């Protein structure tokens, strides 16, 4: 089975970490979306991303990636995630899912309406130290 090809939305501090993580997993990143032209060009070249766009509308007009990482600032999560979900693109949305309850509800509503996966990026839930703490609390080793 071929590996999915993903898009990374936002080429800031965390977008670059997602690019590096996909590269380490051998997952091809087909597209980068970043409004700042200089950042877009620099990061696309550094991670050898073949297509780069200034906005999500441009990406979706051209192609439908198998999945996307949403690494834009929190207040922009809703617009970006809803557009991708409406286009049928599963999303990994960096934490926090949104910066207002209304934005979070809009993202969840869109995921439920479309049936497309929306995964908030609470990655530390899977890290060994956090798992160990979780297990200790669940086992009652830290008291009540
Ligand atoms: N930096 C961290 O340590 C950290 C840790 C955990 C979670 N996060 C989350 O990651 C997300 C990104 O944070 P960051 O630190 O990378 O921010 P950043 O400001 O470094 O980068 C955000 C990038 O998104 C771009 N951008 C803005 N609006 C956009 C849009 N509509 N479409 C595409 N690109 C857009 C900006 O130009 C910028 O390059 C946030 O949700 C943040 O909460 C960051």
Image (tube, rainbow, N blue to C red):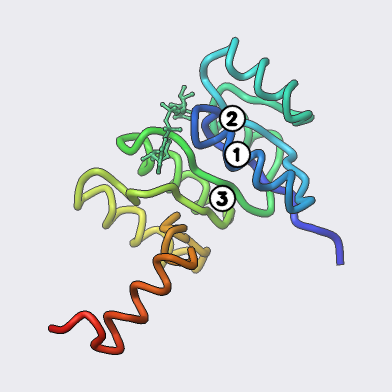
Q: Which residue is mark 2?
A: 33
CA gap, disc 1 to disc 2? 6 Å
Alpha-carbon span between mark 3 and mark 1:
15 Å
Q: Which residue is mark 3?
A: 87
Q: Is mark 3 within 8 Å of ligand 1?
A: no
Mark 2 CB lies closer than 8 A to ligand 1 = yes
- Badge 1 or badge 2: first in the primary sequence: 1
Mark 2 or mark 3, which is nearer the start of the sequence? 2
**In the rendering, at what x and y percent does residue 53 appear?**
63, 25
Q: Is mark 1 within 8 Å of ligand 1?
A: no
* Label 1 residue SS: strand
> Mark 3 and mark 2: span between their CA atoms?
16 Å
Q: Decide: marks 1, 2 in contact (CB < 8 A)? A: yes
Residue beneath label 1, please? 8
Q: Is residue 107 above or below residue 75?
A: below
Residue that protrudes farthest toward the left in the picture: 144
Label 2 residue SS? strand
Residue at 56% over, 50% down: 87
User: Closer to the camera, 90 or 58?
Assistant: 90
Residue 88 higher or lower than 31, as above or below: below
């Amino acid at each position: 089975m071929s590996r999915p090809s993903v898009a990374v939305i936002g080429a800031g501090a965390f977008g670059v970490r997602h690019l590096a993580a996909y590269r380490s997993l051998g997952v091809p990143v087909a597209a980068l979306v970043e409004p700042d032209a200089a950042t877009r060009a620099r990061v696309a070249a550094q991670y050898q991303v073949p297509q780069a766009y200034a906005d999500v509308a441009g990406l979706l007009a051209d192609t439908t990636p198998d999945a996307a990482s949403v690494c834009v600032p929190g207040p922009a999560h809703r617009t970006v995630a809803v557009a991708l979900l409406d286009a049928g693109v599963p999303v990994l949305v960096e934490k926090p899912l949104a910066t207002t309850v209304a934005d979070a509800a809009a993202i969840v509503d869109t995921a439920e309406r479309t049936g497309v996966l929306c995964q908030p990026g609470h990655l530390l839930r899977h890290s060994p130290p956090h798992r160990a703490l979780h297990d200790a609390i669940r086992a009652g080793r830290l008291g009540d």
